[in-house]
Amino acid sequence: MFGNFFSKGQSKPSNEPLSSAQVTQLIDDTLANYVSENFPNGVLNVCIKYQLEQDKNITIQLIMPFPCQGELDELAASLSKALGQEVSIVVTLQVKPVRHFALGSDAGEKADGAVKQGNIANIIAIASGKGGVGKSTTTVNLAYALMAEGAKVGILDADIYGPSIPTMLGLTHEKPGSTDGKLMTPLLAHGLSAMSIGFLVDPNDATVWRGPMASSAFNQLLNETAWPTLDYLLIDMPPGTGDIQLTLAQKVPVAAAVIVTTPQDIALVDATKGIAMFNKVQVPVLGIVENMSYHICENCGHQSHIFGEAGGKDMAQSNQTTLLGQLPLDIAIRQDADFGQSDIIENSTGEIASHYRKIARNIAGQLFLQCDNASPLTPIVEQQQ
């Protein structure tokens, strides 16, 4: 990675120790020139505040508009190696995301709605065209991944008819309380704030409601919960393109949507309909997460594309959106979901956690790049005198 930087006029460090000024210059140049999917014009081009402290160890203090701790840790490790093994670089990250909402006709009205009192910076809908693609499992793990990347996160289970979030968070028999008798207090799972209809009804009962009743319940869960200050609220949407999806688009200051699919054709067809629906209601689609993309044999390591290959990539290209990442079909992910656990909590640097954390960074990064006026991709309009 650093070969590109050194080839642009910089020379690799020799065995002689670098001066403080040389170290500062190398770090500054690297942060300015580092390019990735989420930093198309360098880290310094998007950071809100940057401070460098040199002592025994080197500390880089950054305030960023989106969580990206994992990518910055990798960058710091590479810098440490470039400077010498005795030099340790630590990146401290503070996240200050700007509030976004979709640019529909009633966007201004939605921005002043009841959700504002909950201090929620960004609401992201995690949706799918059909059931069975692992949307809820993906939502939970992405929430934990965003937390591991440095964000404050909540999750709302909008699947009124089949809530699964309580089980996946290990909160099956928990009930929310209230401090004022008006708003419900969200439950906590490893620091993740959560609310679901599954907390309020018997898990063995069937919710037999018509569409308007389900939409009303969704509104109550969102607006009558005392959400803490959150950088991101992920909404686990029910499959399809029905009443709750329309309620979300029309009455909630949602920032954007993410589509979860598997590579198989039948899932891709329905996922395409989901993209079309969000386009119609003017909610940006940040990209596609391809779940169950492949399976790696535990014995021989062979990679099998059980549900097809490259379906999510082709779908992203045909719909002019981004493939945010591909997740493996792994028994550990299924077991964690069944037992209310997450590998991201247990091993935040493991292989499974790395997959989710990269996708989480891509979601947060694409939200900034696609929807923020401060984005380096936002065209500059010059007024002529």
Image: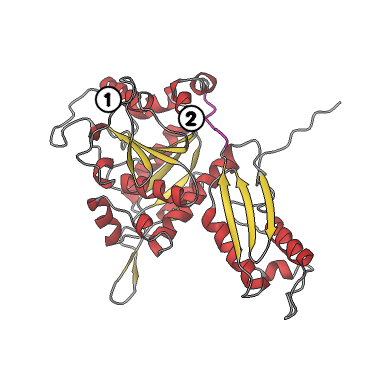
**Could you say where residue 55 lies in the image, as x and y percent from the top left?**
68, 63
Residue 102 included in the magenta stretch of the image: yes
Tag 1 or tag 2, which sits nearer the N-term? 2
**Could you say where residue 243 lies in the image, as x and y percent from the top left?**
33, 26
319 in relation to 24, above or below: above
* Residue carrying label 1: 214
Q: Nearer the viewer, residue 94 or 307?
A: 94
| Amino acid found under the numbered disc labelled 1 | Ala
Q: Residue at x 42, y 54 (%)?
A: 356
Disc 2, SS? loop
Q: Nearer the viewer, mark 2 or mark 1?
A: 2
Residue 131 visible, this orientation: yes
> Where does the magenta region start and end?
98-104
In this rendering, the count of numbered labels is 2
Which quarter of the picture shows residue 373?
Answer: top right
| Amino acid found under the numbered disc labelled 2 | Asn
Is residue 236 found left or right of 57 in the rendered image? left
Is residue 252 found left or right of 11 in the rendered image? left
Residue 119, numbered circle: 2
Residue 371, numbered circle: none
Q: Nearer the viewer, residue 337 or 279?
A: 337
Q: Residue at x 25, y 37 (%)?
A: 163
375 in relation to 347, above or below: above
Is residue 322 found left or right of 224 in the rendered image? right
